[in-house]
Image (spheres, rainbow, N blue to C red):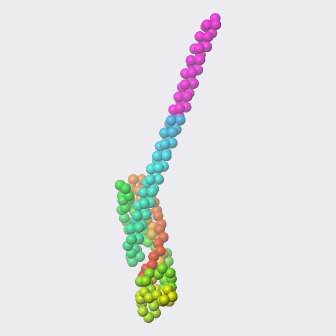
Amino acid sequence: MNRKYTQHGKHRQNGATLVTALVMLVVLTLMVISAIKSSTVNLRIAGNMQIQEEAIAAAQQTTEQMLSFNFTALPAAQNVTTTIGSTAYPVAVPTPVCKGSRPLLNSEPNLPQTCLSSGSLQNTGIIFSSGVASGGTSWCYAQQWEVQTNATDPNTGATTIMHQGVSLNVPAGTGC
């Protein structure tokens, strides 16, 4: 009789092991699925950040192109295509906005010599032996401008808007 009882106990134990193994397999499968979903989300986040950084680079490059020529003479809106890597970004540049203008004095530090003037002679570039330029208003204005660029990713349609403040010395009489 002991023998039958022992065999019956072994048989029950084999079934419990199978159920435990199946539960562990299900738990392991759920953990793998969760890890795959997590890595997919992280991959999307990294891809979106790369797209955002490229759009910012396109906007910055376009702003630098705008500032490399005298945009203050005839400020106008522009549409530019800027290539970053292998992607061509359409970038819209609304008309730059002048935020303020003030005349510069001859006595201001770091004033370019082309801006110096005097009451009797204009644009002389003369600086007195004391190191101070002749008094009065120079031939330059200090202007503050705002340049905005709107770069759009052609694949996703996401738009990056960048505002850049610019301070320039311009010839006197340049409109604001």
Residue 14 sits inside the magenta stretch? yes
Instruction: Tell me if I can see residue 175 in this picture.
Output: no
Location of residue 152 in the rendering, given as x and y in whole percent from the top left corner: 41, 59
Residue 14 sits in quarter? top right
- Residue with the most extreme top position: 1
- The quarter of the picture where the C terminus appears is bottom left
Location of residue 141 in the rendering, given as x and y in whole percent from the top left corner: 46, 81
Location of residue 20 in the rendering, given as x and y in whole percent from the top left corner: 57, 24
- Residue with the most extreme right position: 2
| Residue plotted at (61% across, 7% down) | 3
Viewer-nearest residue: 170 or 78: 170
| Magenta part of the chain | 1-30
Residue 17 sits in quarter? top right
| Residue plotted at (57% across, 19% down) | 15
Q: Where 130 sits versus 77, above or below?
A: below
Q: Of helix, strand and loop, which mostly describes the magenta segment? A: helix
| Residue plotted at (44% across, 60% down) | 56
Q: Where 144 sits versus 128, above or below?
A: above
Location of residue 134 in the rendering, given as x and y in whole percent from the top left corner: 48, 89
Instruction: Tell me if I can see residue 122 in this picture.
Output: yes
- The quarter of the picture where the N terminus appears is top right
Q: Where 67 sits versus 87, above or below?
A: below
Viewer-nearest residue: 164 or 121: 121
Residue 124 sits in quarter? bottom left
